[in-house]
Image (spheres, grey):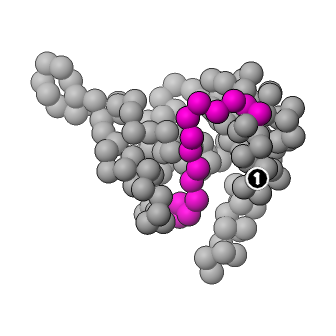
Amino acid sequence: LYILEATGKTGMLNGEIAQMIKDLGHSKETIIADAAEPKSIAEIRKAGIDRITKARKGPDSIRHGIEYLQQFKIVVDERLFQVIEELDNYTWQKDKKTGEYINKPVDSFNHFLDAVRYAADKQSLKSADSFEQKLRKARTYFG
């Protein structure tokens, strides 16, 4: 799994997010957004980003998404220091009584990684291009 581009900025309004997507040349790409923000998704869509859709969430979707990503070798462009920092610092919660790690991630150092999980989720892509179409397109870039 190659992560070649990442953009992140805090405090942006939805119109600014839509404009940034356009400025980066991604307005015709499938955008998978956090399902917890339906109003934001609607506003970004209204601003001209028609292919934005919500991420699929459900019981244990974070853990299942992480397990899915763990099957891949992840290669990150060295310029994406924020993504590398998240990968270096991502961790699991510890049981307070035993001090042993439990199968629940800590909710920090995960903003870019959440986006990677959303993008890799086959079900979230069902309303736009199929996962297989995206995979074929990606393979043309990497041989």
- In which quarter of the view is residue 143 placed? bottom right
How many callouts does the rendering have? 1
Instruction: Measuring from the top left, give residue 120's x and y in whole percent.
Output: 59, 50
79 or 141, nearer to the observer: 79
Q: Residue at x 73, y 37 (%)?
A: 16
Looking at the picture, which amino acid does disc 1 mark?
A: Asp
Q: Which residue is drawn at 42% across and 56% down?
A: 81
73 or 80, nearer to the observer: 80
In the displayed structure, does residue 1 sit left or right of residue 36? left
Instruction: Measuring from the top left, give residue 41's x and y in whole percent.
Output: 75, 30
Label 1: few (<14), some or many (≥20) within 10 Å? few
Disc 1 designates what residue?
A: 23
Q: Which residue is drawn at 56% across and 63% down?
A: 4
Looking at the image, can residue 71 be seen? no
* Boundaries of the magenta span: 1-15
Q: Is residue 27 above or below residue 35?
A: below
In the displayed structure, does residue 60 sit left or right of residue 131? left
